[in-house]
Amino acid sequence: MIRNVRAYLIGILIMIAACIMPGTVSAAPGDIGNASDGVAENGWLSVKGTTLVNEQGQPVVLHGMSSHGLQWYPQFTTSNAIGATASYGANLFRVAMYTAEGGYIENKSSLRKQLYRSVDAAISRNMYVIIDWHILSDGNPKKYQKEAKAFFKKVSRRYGNVPNVIYEICNEPNGEGNWNRIRSYAKAVIPVIRRNAPSSVILVGTPTWSQDVDIAAGSPLPYPNLMYSCHFYAGTHGEWLRQKVKAALDKGLPVFVSEWGTSEASGNGGVHEEEADRWISFMRQHQLSWANWSYCDKDESSAALVPKADPEDGISRSELSKSGRYVFSKF
Ligand code: IDC
């Protein structure tokens, strides 16, 4: 009896602690799931006006995590690791394959194999998955255009019939990567993808680290089923960038937020929750799909996991960083 009372009291204490210290208690301990509003439910996606729609023509909004660079953090792109984000409500995963910094250009066959493993992992979880040709220090996408064409030819041959896959042809053009050069690059790469994947949605980066969607809206590309990327970091980009997105949408340009962070543009500093709140309500209002940077345990504030977190057996709340707790509550 006394023992029962003690157990009862301990139980109450644990529940009280759970309420006072939510960060220390698992919301979805060990949960690994499939997306509940994913590919089985929505099928092939397409772009109607500025809106992403499902196979039934209904608007659909995708949201989930972006991996960090695949050359550094492949362990966060396994089926279980991705399934752990689905159990919190994600229906999208973005696989960031850097071109430079030890990425694809230097390690083609090993990174392509890794990319396939990661994409297959997301597919196994009923999720949409973005194959991101992650240009960054190589600001002009034309720099590796030949490699991009060869890459997308192979990849689209493998996934052309798979409704899960979305192709992102250049992460963040910058510097020399102005809109004329991006257009020229897109006109070289998109037909290569279309030959194998006639129905897939393709994302096109915009100038100035994928911010100048308003410039893209001035002369969009002449292909259907395209969306244009806008990227923001809540500690750096605010109302002025939302105004650019608004201007682009008003001109009829479909926009996809294929990368955003709660931190500053450096990937560190923050978490900037107030500005992130403004962005989240803006994205909800305009039904914008998004992927958050980044799903890894690097010691930087944009990372969703705390150092040494292991998502193989699901993610407990205590393994989520401050940014991760914020973002995972928005799926
Ligand atoms: C950052 C990573 C950081 C890494 C750096 C260079 O967070 O760990 O050292 O890249 O590889 C982007 C890029 C994205 C950046 C991110 C934050 O797409 O690769 O990641 N960012 O700086 N655009 C704006 C911000």
Image (tube, grey):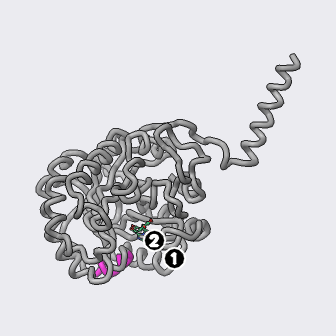
Q: Residues within 10 Å of mark 1 (few under 14, many from 20)?
A: some
x 20%, y 53%: residue: 109
Gap between marks 1 and 2 measured at Cα: 8 Å
Amino acid type, callout 1: Thr
x 53%, y 47%: residue: 309
x 39%, y 51%: residue: 92
Taking depth in this image into account, of 81 and 254 the one nearest to the observer is 81
Query: Is residue 301 toward the left or the right of residue 290 in the image?
Result: right
Q: Can residue 244 be seen in this view?
A: yes
Asked whether the residues under the numbered discs 1 and 2 touch, taking CB atoms below 8 Å apart as contact, a structural biologist would say: yes
x 23%, y 54%: residue: 200
Query: Considering the numbered disc 1 on the image, is that residue within a helix, a strand or a loop?
Result: loop
Q: Name the residue under label 2.
A: 232
Residue 141 image point, x, y percent: 24, 73
180 vs 187: above or below: below
For residue 295, the mark is none
Q: Is residue 252 visible?
A: no
Taking depth in this image into account, of 43 and 63 the one nearest to the observer is 63
Amino acid type, callout 2: Phe
97 vs 186: above or below: above
